Image: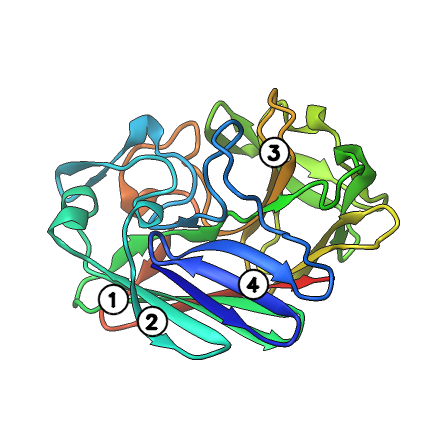
Amino acid sequence: MTVRIENDNLIVEIHEHGAELQSVRRKDSELEYLWQADPKYWNRHSPVLFPIVGRLKNNQFDYEGHTYYLSQHGFARDLNFIVIEQSATHAVFELRDSPLTKNLYPFSFHFQIRYTLTTNDTVKIEYFVHNPGETPIYFQVGGHPAFNVPLEVNHKFTDYYVNVDPVKEYDRVKLIGPYSDPEHMGTFNPRIPLRLRYDDYKEDAIILSLEKQQTSLILARLDASHGVTMNLKDANYVGIWSPYGKDAPFVCLEPWWGIADTIDADGDITHKFAINKLAGQKDFSANWSLTFF
């Protein structure tokens, strides 16, 4: 089932499968901002990453003497959520632990995603994790929205750029294969906006360490005629990605509260790099927003 919310400017569609954004369109220009999941390039629109972000070493983790197997980015993107609340301008989706999830991930959880049109041009996305048990749970969460580049015909991928604010030197997490290498950080300085080039993704995503600093990214055409601004309040990381070697007509801006296993991970989820630990009966929340112009 697809849920539709809208206001004077935007029409937003979210599917209950994975609580995944499917479409964001402006009424005045009829532009479709969200990538439409052509399997020739990538068959997703904006998957939700939970209970891990990225890949586990050998796709497995250990907890209290047992080994569990999880594929990249976790299972939430492949399961049906329940719509628990809906109005003209917002919708709330929920996923709870089940016998299926317990085979993959031994923890009890209530995971909610709220989509709200907060202004005529802005969609706010909120994550809520509740631990209904008495013992801690360990998790990561994040977004993976893909945006059409170019947005209009007769434009090119290289006509677009990404700008990061505040302008400063960021630590850049390098990847070795699918694993992160935080012990050997690179740097990224957005003093000059990042002109889009496919070769920049030869080593996978450009990953910036934000250290929970409020940050915004603008993806737009060079003349700034149309684009999207992502506002991050307290994310740990953000990834910028397009699949290398495919000349794909989209770019992902990915807010993360977590990251892939390190190359030397020992497999114990309680030791996992950038893991979130949530005590029993406690709540975790995170949010980000997208403004379309």
Find out whether the residues at labels 2 and 3 contact each other: C-beta distance under 8 Å.
no
Where residue 169 appears, as percent x and y from the top left, is 75, 46
Colour treatment of the image? rainbow
Q: Which residue is mark 3?
A: 242
**Label 1: which residue?**
131
Q: CA distance from mark 2 to mark 1?
A: 6 Å
Marks 4 and 2, how far apart at CA:
16 Å
Mark 2–mark 1 contact, CB under 8 Å? Answer: yes
Give the percent coordinates (x, y) of residue 208: 63, 44
Residue that mark 4 sits on:
234
**Label 4: few (<14), some or many (≥20) within 10 Å?**
some
Give the left or right position of residue 74, taking residue 7 as reference: left
Q: Spatial distance from mark 1 to mark 4, Cα to Cα? A: 21 Å
Check residue 283 in the rendering and tell me which mark sits there, or answer none. Answer: 2
Q: Residues within 10 Å of mark 3 (few under 14, many from 20)?
A: many
Cβ atoms at labels 4 and 2 below 8 Å apart: no
Q: Amino acid at mark 2?
A: Asp
Rendering quarter of residue 291? bottom right
Who comes first in sequence, dot 1 or dot 4? 1
Say which label, 3 or 1, has the lower sequence index: 1
Expressed as whole percent of the image width and height from the top left, the position of residue 260 reads 44, 38
| Residue under the point 31% across and 45% down | 78
Residue furthest top in the image: 245
Secondary structure beneath dot 4 equals loop
